[in-house]
């Protein structure tokens, strides 16, 4: 038999001209849309949780930066006056006049506002009212709706430690024998906000921080130490440790949070 006449094992075939029908295209498109929809359904809650967490962290960072500005203002005040400001200034007859947050205004880039105030009259005297109705951004926790008192005074979301920022006279660093890094100077609070000019804007940290206290930030509070450091602490903090951190000269030289 002649090998040249044998049938080849492989033959070339012409490609088919395949054109999908409208129904097939519809099914393909529907499948793609279903896949996209399923992905959105599955991942949207995850993305939402991530966004909520991001916003919470951004708010805490912004609030921490504001408290650091307050700390810097207090330290600059100390550098100039060799003492921290009094928690509240009083007239000779005992009438409360002005707050520690008013005293540090020139060190908070608020010199213009400071110069508007008549320090011979109380903070809530009608002459001073327009000044104390002005917000000081660093005295606020971003995202907090309550910014003014019913009387129209601008609020502060931070409160001074009355054990350090005492009435009538300030305390120098030399009297903080427990250590600057172990003594609270101010904290953020969750309710009962006072105007930043109110001499009563003072409290013991234990009256502000705790499991039964309201917080602006989830799960705890920001605290400002006397060295200017800011730290977030849980509202479940050991009361004994919180008390030790609140006293400037209680004999506690180191407290671990």
Image: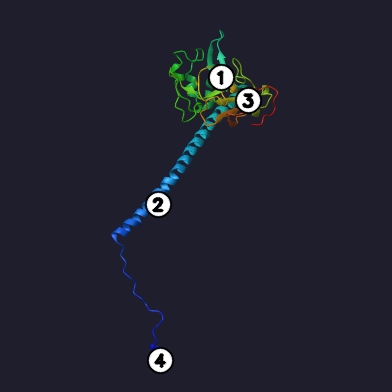
Residue placed farthest to the front in the image? 1
Q: Nearer the viewer, residue 217 or 200?
A: 217
Judge depth for marks 4 and 3 and give the one in front: 4
Q: Nearer the viewer, residue 239 or 177?
A: 239
How far apart are the two marked residues, 3 and 2, measured between alpha carbons? 54 Å
Chain-order first, disc 4 or disc 3: 4
Residue 75 position, x and y percent, is: 60, 26
Q: Which residue is mark 3?
A: 239
Query: SS at mark 3?
Result: helix
Q: Which residue is mark 2?
A: 35
Query: SS at mark 4?
Result: loop
Vertical order, 33 against 192 (above or below): below
What's the residue at 54%, 20% (across, down)? 103
Pointer 2: residues within 10 angstroms few (<14), some, or many (20+)? few
Residue 49 position, x and y percent, is: 47, 40
Q: Which residue is mark 1?
A: 202
Q: Are marks 2 and 4 in contact (CB under 8 Å)?
A: no
């Amino acid at each position: 038999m002649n090998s040249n006449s044998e049938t080849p094992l492989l033959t070339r075939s012409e490609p088919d001209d395949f054109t999908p029908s409208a129904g097939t295209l519809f099914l393909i498109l529907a499948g793609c849309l279903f896949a996209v929809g399923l992905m959105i359904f599955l991942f949207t809650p995850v993305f939402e949780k991530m966004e909520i967490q991001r916003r919470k962290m951004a708010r805490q960072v912004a609030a921490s930066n504001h408290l650091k500005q307050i700390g810097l203002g207090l330290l600059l005040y100390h550098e100039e006056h060799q003492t921290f400001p009094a928690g509240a200034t009083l007239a000779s007859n005992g009438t409360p006049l002005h707050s520690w947050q008013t005293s540090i205004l020139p060190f908070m880039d608020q010199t213009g506002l400071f110069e508007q105030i008549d320090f011979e009259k109380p903070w809530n005297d009608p002459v001073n009212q327009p000044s104390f109705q002005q917000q000081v951004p660093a005295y606020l926790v971003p995202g907090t709706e309550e910014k003014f008192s019913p009387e129209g005074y601008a609020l502060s979301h931070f409160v001074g430690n009355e054990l350090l920022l005492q009435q009538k006279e300030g305390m120098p660093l030399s009297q903080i024998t427990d250590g600057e890094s172990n003594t609270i100077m101010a904290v953020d609070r969750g309710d009962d906000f006072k105007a930043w000019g109110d001499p009563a804007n003072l409290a013991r940290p234990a009256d502000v921080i705790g499991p039964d206290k309201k917080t602006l930030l989830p799960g705890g509070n920001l605290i400002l130490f006397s060295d200017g450091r800011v730290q977030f602490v849980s509202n479940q903090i050991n009361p004994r440790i919180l008390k030790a951190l609140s006293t400037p000269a209680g004999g506690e030289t180191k407290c671990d949070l």
